Image (cartoon, rainbow, N blue to C red):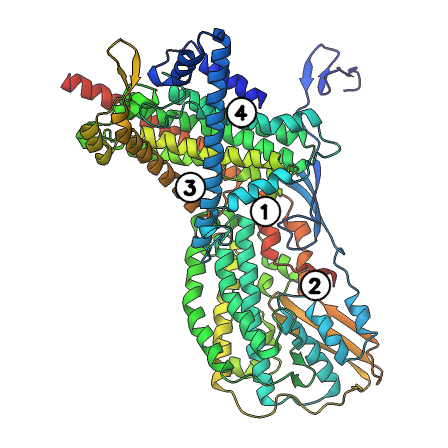
Amino acid sequence: MSNETSKTMPSTRLRQTSAGEVTVDIRTPDLEINFGPQHPATHGVMRVLMRTDGELVTGAQPHLGYLHRCAEKIGENVEWLQYLPYTDRYDYLASMNNNLGYSLAVEALLGIEIPRRATLIRIICAELNRIGSHLVAFGTYGLDIGAFTPFLYCFREREWMMALFEKICGARLTYSYIRIGGVFNDAPPGWFEEVARFCDVFDEKWKEYVDLLLVNQIYVKRTAKVGVISREMALDFGLTGTMLRGSGIDWDLRRDMPYMCYGEIWRDGAFKIPVARGEMGELGDCWDRSWVRVMEMIESIKIVRWCLDHMVDGPVIGELPKTLKVPAGEAYVGIENPRGELGHYVVSDGGKVSIRTRVRGPSFCNLAVLEDTLPGALVGDAVAIIGSTDIVVGETDR
Amino acid sequence: MSTSSFLALAQAGTPVEVASGSNAFLEGLKAALGEHLPEWALWLGAAGAGVAIVMGLISVVAMFCVWLERKVAGHIQCRYGPMYTGWHGWLQSIADGVKLLLKEDMIPRDADRALFMLAPGLVLAAIVAAMTAFPLAPGVFFADLDLGVFFVIAMSSMTTIGVVMAGWASNSKWTVYGAMREAAQVVAYEIPLGVSLLVPVMVAGTMNLNEASAAQSDYLGMGWFLFKNPFMIPAFVLFFVAALAETKRAPFDLPEAESELVAGFMTEYSGIRWSFFFMEEYAAMFLMSAVAAVFFLGGFESPLTHFVGQAFGTELFVQGANGATELNLQALPYQAVAGLTLLVKTFAGIFLMMWLRWTLPRIRVDQVMTMGYKYLTPLALVCAVGAALWEAGKQALLG
């Protein structure tokens, strides 16, 4: 090329060599496009800076922080009990589980025993909330794929779940119901019967989602073999929860690092851990992850039923002082949130306020995988992949 | 709406052979004002009246379709849809229209202002022009074109130019995506759409919508083209799928794919300009559905139309005693029933499109292209060739 004097002709990409040959450079520069923060498919205010070549994504980088509310720092400034409402707000679709995680961590420091009835009510609430969270995840995933209706079918059941929570604690989204030492108050009369009814109805309704969306041929074509996360990749990125099980790794904290009485329920054989098998395409694709979510809802129903069957009478919260002083020490408790392992690390110097509160958010850790899965996908696939990681931006940014 | 009036004027004044009803406005105006006004003024008046009526029709159809869409969506999704404005929310579209008219007219600072403002008008103009060929009843239409269906397809695909223009002029990456998708999709699906429509055109032997409808009046009004040739049913399915893609309806709504491209080519539009795109979408649905109804599902013909026609007579215009064209009011029931029949068939198609939209997920962009080029186009060609051979064989055997 050195002895050729190539000159650029006025019409941009035409080049003429010294031999008189005219060549055309048909490459086009990649387009940098901001996917978010205001975009219908980012489920909040996340921004993915994507480099695209036509419809093809060639690079992607998630940017975080649009919903940062200093949650951890607040934990070091308010009293132990006062921090609980803040935990509601990081994964606002699974507030019960967040309350539970924080309460368990502080209880581990306190070294107190929780009344049996409170434990069972906690599990019922956590599992019902898992169902509600997965309903949102599955429904909004349908929205991402372009199916509007399953979303509202999911919300029909979620509405009932929220009504149940409203009856037990008065709130529909940010419950602050599970407290340090137990739960806020006992269930109102007839609540357990209604939960049982909900379980019966849900056992029928989940089949509708499967028929309408999960096995829909267009849905399968859109999600199978898309956004494949291999087993190795899942482990390397430290994925947890449905993302991990969607890649075929059998790991669930409820069984493998049991807290409360999940170990007892597991030994009773009351529930199974659904692990993806790559039925529709490759192991670890988007379809597998959504399948795991649907199957987990059914298992949650079984756990709720077990708790209802083994319900005991008694107090629901221990005697705790108004101003809690926690013995010096540190504790980490990880629980199985709908999105993965939600870990709370708290350090106390024996005072009224925590000296370090650290949250390991599952959405935040699962999000990292986007940078490796998005390149090579189409723009439509990118939406499917982001949706299948099921992030809640309130938690990634905290 | 200067562009639309121009097109419709060219349309109304076209030298293509015009049948009795098409110049009803012109005839009426001539009779009333012929002595006072020059010929061109009368033509202009007739064209204006035609455009006004077509615009009115499009607006009413779009409003009704928006309401219907919301109700259908609501009932599919276990809810009611609009309920507060009027009986079952029937005023909702009007309320929305007023809101859209009153909204601030926003044009992005870096947009190409001229093209940005022109694009919605162009889109609407194209669909208005296409609509002029739509017959309201056997004797009532704006333009009785011999190339009727060709004209409809050609004009409705003109909307693509407006869409691409809108996407480009908005100066946003998302809108360019939407525009490019629209262009690719329409080019891909124009072929199966046209070719599958060739099948009924061959069976009918005409492209004229009125004549095609009349050709299906045998067997007590049940001689629909759909039953006249074994290749018609696959051709109908192909036409319907291609029409879905052509009108940007789900599962082919990629140009405005909400979850992918925010709102596609309409992202930067708001207020009444945005509603023009909306009107175009529903008018295009209506038009495609009407073409399907005329060329596959018997058009005006049904047993009811047949018997009403026998009882009351069919011709709206008859030759009077002095040789002038006279209105035959006796035929009005027939005309009304025929028009309603076509409307019912058309709205059945629209309902099906809505039903699909609220049930199916969206197809990915490469799958849309694969489907158009690899499956629909060859299948449509097979249908066309098969139907041609069948018709030729029929003529050879039956004479």
SS of the residue at dot 4? Answer: helix
Instruction: Provide the residue designation for mark 1.
Output: B259
Q: Residues within 10 Å of mark 2 (few under 14, many from 20)?
A: many
Earlier-in-chain disc, 1 versus 3: 1
Instruction: Look at the picture and state if B106 lies above or below B124.
Output: below
Q: Which quadrant is the C terminus of chain B positioned in?
A: top left
Instruction: Provide the residue designation for mark 2.
Output: A395
C-alpha gap between disc 2 and disc 4: 49 Å
Earlier-in-chain disc, 4 versus 1: 4
The amino acid type, in three-letter code, at marker 3 is Met
The amino acid type, in three-letter code, at marker 1 is Ser
* Residue sitting at x 30%, y 16%: B326
Name the side, left or right, on which B201 lies relative to A123. left
The residue nearer to you, when weighing B311 against A115, is B311
* Residue sitting at x 68%, y 23%: A25
C-alpha gap between disc 4 and disc 3: 23 Å
C-alpha gap between disc 1 and disc 3: 20 Å
* Residue sitting at x 70%, y 53%: A46
Q: Chain of mark 1?
A: B
